[in-house]
Amino acid sequence: MASKGPSPQDSVPEEDCQLHIKSAQQQQDFSYQSGIAIGFRQLWTMLKRNTILQIRYRRSTFAQTLLGPILFLFLLWVLQKADTSRQLQSNYHPKPWTLSGIDQCQGRTPLDPCINIMFTPDTPEIREILATVNSRNQLREPTVSLKFMNAFTASDLNTLPTETQGMVPVPNGKFIYDYTLQNPNTTRFGIEFSIVQGPPKNYAYQTWFNFTNSANGTDPFGDSLLSFTRAVDEAILLLTDSSSTDLNVSLKDFPKVPPTLASDQVVSSLGAMFFFCSMMVIFICVLNQIVTEKELHLRHSMQMMGLKTLVYWFSWWLSNAVLVLISAVVICGFGTAFGFTVFKNSNFLALLVTFFLFGLSMVTMAFWITTMVKASRTAILIGIFLFIIGLLFESMVFSNSFVGYLWYDASTSPVARYVLMFLPFFNFGKIFLDMSLFATGRFDVLTETYIPGPGFHWSDLYNKVPTDFTPTYDDARTRHPDVPAPIQSWYLMLMNIGVFAILTLYFDQVVADDYGNRRHLMFFLDPSFYGWNIRKKLTTKEWIAAQEANKTKRDARREKMKKGRIPREDEDDNDVDEERRNALDADYETSARICNLQKVFQESAFRKSPLDKIAVKDLCLTLQDGKLLALLGQNGAGKSTTMNMLSGLTKSTGGDALFYGLSMNNEMAEIRSMMGVCPQHDILFGDLTAEEHIQLYAGLKNVPKEEIPKLTEDRLKAVRLWKVKDRLSHTYSGGMKRRLSMVISTLGDPKIIFLDEPTTGMDPTNRRHVWSFIEKFKQGRIIILTTHSMEEADILGDRICVMAHGRLRAIGNSIHLKNKFGAGYRISIMTDPSTTEQVKAIVETKVPGAILKDDSAGALLYQFPPSSMGSIPQLVQWLEGTDSAEIASLPASSSEGNSKNNSDRNTPLPPLNGSSNNSLNTHANNALANSTGHAPKVNALQWGISQTSLEDVFLKLIRDANPDGYQGYEVSSSKEKNVDDHEATLRNRRA
Ligand SMILES: Nc1ncnc2c1ncn2[C@@H]1O[C@H](COP(=O)(O)OP(=O)(O)OP(=O)(O)O)[C@@H](O)[C@H]1O
């Protein structure tokens, strides 16, 4: 598991390791591997990655699967409770009371039969009391005549009264409670007597009464109650001797537990809205996750390592399907646990499938939206917007008139219905309503009662909702004759999934990405999209001819557009010319060739303009196995654009490259399978560890599973990240991230590697480790490296090319460039400030061509051309005050030191733990003293001599490329600095 705890420092030495790098012969031959097998391997790898990330983002995953559903169910439950109390208050007796007497009983509607008095026990004495109540009441209310009805037995709990004005004997007080509970608004009074024979005779009775009995709610204890108890008291007292009679009256409210059916209307009517909300949590998380991955270029990075588009989407879809399934199970399980009738009374599997399909269709819809959005903030805003729209929609779906309008109304335009069918929440709303009608029942406004439903069974999926179950709406409308069965909503949600999946894949191709890449709108008509390469495979000769023909056309077009006002460009350097000739010579043996590569960034997306930025212009290069090509150039020279084109990140606007016979323009998928890229900016998953990164990218590269542990150890040790392999990458320092990016680019032992400024931000020790790693790795591979470090180019580059303004300015190995463009030698002299002027005069006399480049606080820097080399011994002799024979060897040995080694590279790779080998030997004086065994008489405190450095060559070439000076130098982007800055930095470093 990853930990963020204290960890070894970046610079802690790792144990020595042996790099196990496959030789060129051992390398995997990706081209012969089955695409399907690689696809499955990548899918498995991506699923593992998604699962790790979902576990790491546990708060978000928890919110999507558990918290969201449970929270919304809980809110629904609270609403249900609130509705319950509303139901209680509405359970009133509709007829107002008078003080005069007991009036007629009345059910919920005036016509409903009802019981006026329910009494127990059924004894002659009590019947007599009640008969007296009746006869005396008729004096006050002549129209009310109470009759004794047939007694209810214990089994009559569900028997509704058939007549009005009845007095019904019942078995006991509990019966009164249960009956009034189950049949609210059927009984006016309940009375339970318990008579204790005296003397004094005790008449105790308990009266049940509806305290919320007034239509206007102003009668909490009730005038009616007063009338009734007074009437009963009167009757008792009339029958007995009042002096020996005790009266004991207690009052009780009718039970107020709400009728279950009524309360569940809340779930039926608001449920879809709440379940929509819970699915929207997943929806917004999906939007955010995928767009963030795009925004951070993580997806690009995986695609550059060979990830297939289909695998990418399918892996996310499967991972989210699991979340949706968990969420659906939680909703159904907790819905049942909360006691909602629609859950208890429906087939569990049917409910589960409904929620699952709804969730999946929403996830697929989110995928589609992500293809059109580039910033995660926009994605979240869109998510919230859709959330509100959906919420309004669901609330309307469940307003009866809207549903009636959409589904049950014959006058609804079928077009409206067809359009709405493309919205998952519409289809979900419809089926959930159907289920509610079946499972819960409905409220009948005519009778003002709830009619229970038969339950929703699996077979009901195929049954149309019965006509008398349809929600009531404006009666003036006629019912649509063909309201579809619930199963149709499943089909529609499946259709939604399919349609959104296709739209996702289509939009993903045709909407331009951050690098401006997009396919033609009709790309699916191109057979190559399906992997059928019907284009004739060109021979190298034909391919070169095609590139040349294209260039001619391009130039003609450009000339026409600029109306012949194309400024004359400098002559190419002869090495550059030769490189071009080699690249265009089919017989020239090379592993890869780049021909007339061009990239124009258009000002306008719709038309070409003279202001279009030519980032790379007609680049021609050859690349050899086992040779590293270092690309140098000032900011904005076109290095990264070149790398991006070659790695397939950006489409070229002209030219092509052939890697091992595969065309960059037409066979990028194959090239990618043998390519590794270390981009300029680290593209890492902040919540994955170094080890997990290696496992992910090795999986995408189809490295055999059994090799991955060893590979991980080897590579991480090589760049000294092994000890921090379990730390999340967002806790890494800049240099550590860079090293991890470097290692990732070498996974799968690619034949072609692009390293864009791989050591930026690394400390000198780690930089040397990385250099050593690259040096060991380059055998049998093509490596192109861009850098701003001259030292790096000098050490690693078998060939170095310098670019300026998108053009190649010079190419060759370090020695060749120094000899060709170098300004000779440099000598630095540290003097006593009091003798500086004297030293200057002597130097200028002894070395006639010497140019003073720097003079500060006694530190002199002279440059002199190779032609002045002969005067150096004399100068050194003077500086040292030693005999000339001894001294004469010094510059030569110094320069030899710099130029030892083979013809490809003049500077040896320094030892891993060595310090920087600066060619400017400022300690030569001391060295000489040691070698001669005596302390010489010196005219300078210190001095050193060196050949012109690569920096000087670079600066010269850049200066030549900007003959008007740097003032007019075009700064094309904010990140760019001009050459002056660069030179100043170099000067500071030297100082
Ligand atoms: N997407 C783009 N749209 C327009 N112009 C671009 C775009 N990307 C790069 N450019 C321009 O293309 C030129 C080459 O840019 P590129 O990034 O290749 O330079 P570079 O040599 O890699 O510089 P650096 O050393 O700063 O990374 C620059 O002038 C830059 O402004």
Image (cartoon, rainbow, N blue to C red):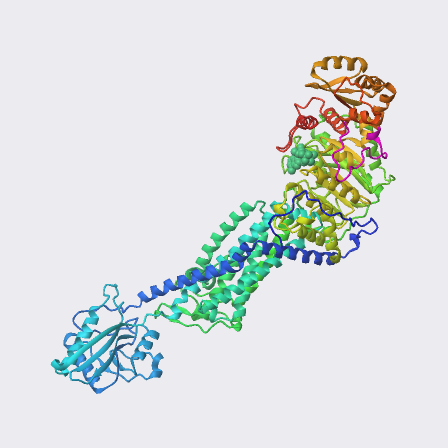
Main secondary structure type of the part rendered in magenta: loop
Is residue 2 rendered to the left or right of residue 896? left
Is residue 91 rendered to the left or right of residue 554? left
Q: Is residue 205 above or below residue 530?
A: below
Residue 732, quarter of the rendered image: top right
Q: Which residues are magenta?
A: 896-920
- Farthest-out residue, front: 934
Residue 628, quarter of the rendered image: top right
> How many marks overall?
0
Q: Measured from the top left, where is residue 577 in percent x and y?
A: 82, 31
Q: Measured from the top left, where is residue 610 in percent x and y?
A: 67, 30
Picture quarter with ligand 1: top right
Q: Nearer the viewer, residue 511 or 752?
A: 752
Q: Is residue 914 magenta?
A: yes
Q: On the rendered image, what quadrant is the C terminus found in? A: top right
Task: Confirm whether residue 601 shows in the render.
Answer: no
Q: Nearer the viewer, residue 625 or 529?
A: 625
